[in-house]
Image: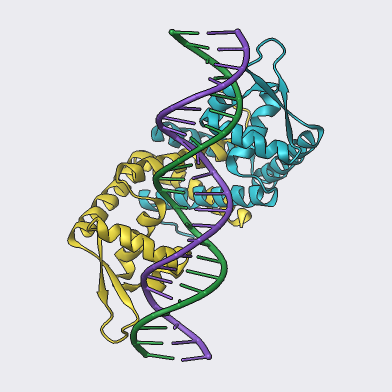
Chain colours: A cyan, B yellow, C green, D purple
Amino acid sequence: MHMVTSVHHSLDGLLSLSLAVAEHTERGLRERDLSRSEARLLWSLAEAAPARQQRLSELLGVTPRYVTRLVDDLSDRGLVERRPHPSDRRSMLVTPTREGERLLSRMRADHDRLADALFGDMSPDKRATFQEIASGVIERLS
Amino acid sequence: MHMVTSVHHSLDGLLSLSLAVAEHTERGLRERDLSRSEARLLWSLAEAAPARQQRLSELLGVTPRYVTRLVDDLSDRGLVERRPHPSDRRSMLVTPTREGERLLSRMRADHDRLADALFGDMSPDKRATFQEIASGVIERLS
DNA sequence: TATTGTTATACTCTATAACTATA
DNA sequence: TATAGTTATAGAGTATAACAATA
């Protein structure tokens, strides 16, 4: 099999790859009925909870106002909860509820399954090559 | 350099890569003050002009109503123009204006430069490997 | 005086539904 | 009657500005 892989083919491959990943991700979120920002907020809480909304605003790169909205929605759905900050009465502390934790577990499981489906039968050598190419491309894109 | 490349590392690399590409693309569009759909419409015209709006709706996967909006905006900016269809008076034919063509040329040049910046100094062998991995991942994601 | 979160408002992207003109 | 495009409306995602409570 003779493959012509000009730089243009490579770029097209990269763009298709990126698109496919984005679409797959969106499908996953839609199945869980989460917007991208909602999912990222939950995901941030996995590591940062309990977090002030101010902190979440920085982590997500969205305005404090929009964090209010996201937390409102997620808490209406029983996935996170707001508690008053013990020492600063201006602040709210956001944590996942038990149901939020369960959702996070399912998301982690999705992640694991995907990693395995995509890379499970690839040789370590090839994975290393991929990783190297990916890093190089990311660096040049910054 | 000993690299640990578990399937999880690989997936993280893939997700970072995809994100970096998406962000780069968005920056490019923002510089040209185009939304993603506007850019895709222009890009479609490069191959399909002159095109009925109905056709553009199919190519872009957006509603006919939204094509009306996109063409309105692009034609307000002098990038495309609507002409009546010669034989079907319900239809409009959309084509890029001369300025639209110039913008398309600049977009093609961006594309070429990017391909070269990202893959220009990569060995053909490695490009082929990347292409192969990308195709595999895309296939598994569908 | 500076910071946290919220109320009020608005903008962009996109869809659905109802309609008009034409086929 | 079916099709092409448009008017009218709406919803999701997100921002800015003004403000209240607290630090």
Q: Answer whether residue B6 is visible to the viewer in this image.
A: no
| Residue sitting at x 69%, y 52% | A31
Who is closer to the viewer here, A115 or B49? B49
Residue A20 image position (x, y, % from top left): 54, 52
| Residue sitting at x 49%, y 50% | B131
Who is closer to the viewer here, A140 or A42? A42
Q: Quadrant of the C terminus of chain A?
A: top left
Residue B40 image position (x, y, % from top left): 38, 58
The correct choice, above or below, for C2 with respect to B14 in the image is above
Q: Is residue B16 left or right of residue B28?
A: right
Q: Is residue B90 left or right of residue A28?
A: left
Who is closer to the viewer here, B90 or A32? B90
Residue B2 image position (x, y, % from top left): 59, 24
Q: Is residue A108 left or right of residue B61?
A: right
Q: Answer whether residue B138 is visible to the viewer in this image.
A: yes
| Residue sitting at x 45%, y 59% | A2
